[in-house]
Amino acid sequence: MDTKLLVPLIFAGFALLEILTGRFFQKDTGKSRDIWIEAVGTPIFILVTVPAIFYAAPLLMNWAFPGSENAWAGLPRWAMVLVLLIGDDMTQYWWHRASHSFPWLYNLHRAHHSGGYMSIRIAYRNAIAYYIFMPGLWIAAILVHLGLGPVYAIYLLVKMTVIFGAHSAIRWDEPLYRIKWLSPVMWVVERTISTPATHFAHHGLHKEDGVTHYKGNYGNLLFFWDVLFGTALITRRYPAEYGIENLEGRSAGGELAWTLVRK
């Protein structure tokens, strides 16, 4: 099956699990503005932004470097994976970290944190411009142009499954922490990939609760980047509340269309 279909199916699978367990609609913590942000922003990202970048990047490469198509197709598969992890996932870590370091960039990212809940619904929840300027997406499109497409398809499936799992209200890691003999395995897992416990901490509301760590735990596929660059906090616990601490509210339009809409 085409990767383009598999990723939405994985997303739908997480959504179905949340629906069946009563965690998708977030009736207690969600607001009508949340529905608008997610219902507008997610389709634009999937149907417009990503196709546009993967269309434009090869055109720019052919203009700047004629004959560059499939130039790296002869690389070993392990080298392709390494290039993708650095070029796509590590740059996304730094883009995410920068988004929490510079106020002008946080305005493009704040929609991802303004919902008072964790759910598969927020996986693609950001301002439209956040993804347009994301370096990792452009680099990924360039790498596919250079011949890494077959490996990228598998890499994307793994990455998006991890990211969806780290945002979903289905906390898949929680029961595994209770199994004593799995503790050494989970020690490795939680330092390698993003898990609900580590990523939920990034979305917590109160930094003084001993769990919340919104100035860290930036990793997307690999949590290893947080370990490597000193931004990791691992507690195996989950915040009681989620959202943005000490920041004024903003309309759905302001979060989706910043800087065109500023309220």
Image (spheres, helix red, strand yellow):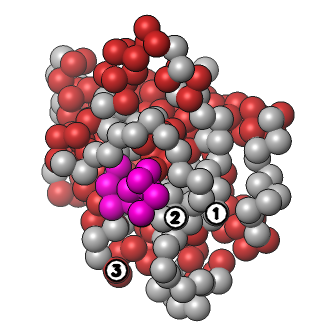
Q: Quadrant of residue 243?
A: bottom right
Residue 167's image quarter?
top right
Which comes before the other along the chain, label 1 or label 3?
3
Q: CA distance from mark 1 to mark 2?
A: 8 Å
Residue 255 vertical placement versus 159 (above, below): below
- Residue 133 screen position, x and y as percent: 36, 66
Which callout, 1 or 2, points at the residue further toward the start of the chain?
1
Sequence-wise first label, 2 or 3: 3
Alpha-carbon neighbours of circle 3 within 10 Å: few (<14), some, or many (≥20)? few
Q: Disc 1 residue type? A: Gly
Cβ atoms at labels 1 and 2 below 8 Å apart: yes
Distance from Cα at disc 1 to Cα at disc 3: 21 Å
Which kind of residue does numbered mark 2 sit on? Answer: Leu
Q: Which residue is mark 3?
A: 103
The residue where tag 2 is placed is 205
Q: Position of residue 92 (x, y in %)?
A: 32, 51
- Give the label, 1 or 2, closer to the camera: 2
Residue of label 1 = 116
Question: What range of the chain is rendered magenta?
Answer: 207-217
Dot 1 falls on a residue whose secondary structure is loop
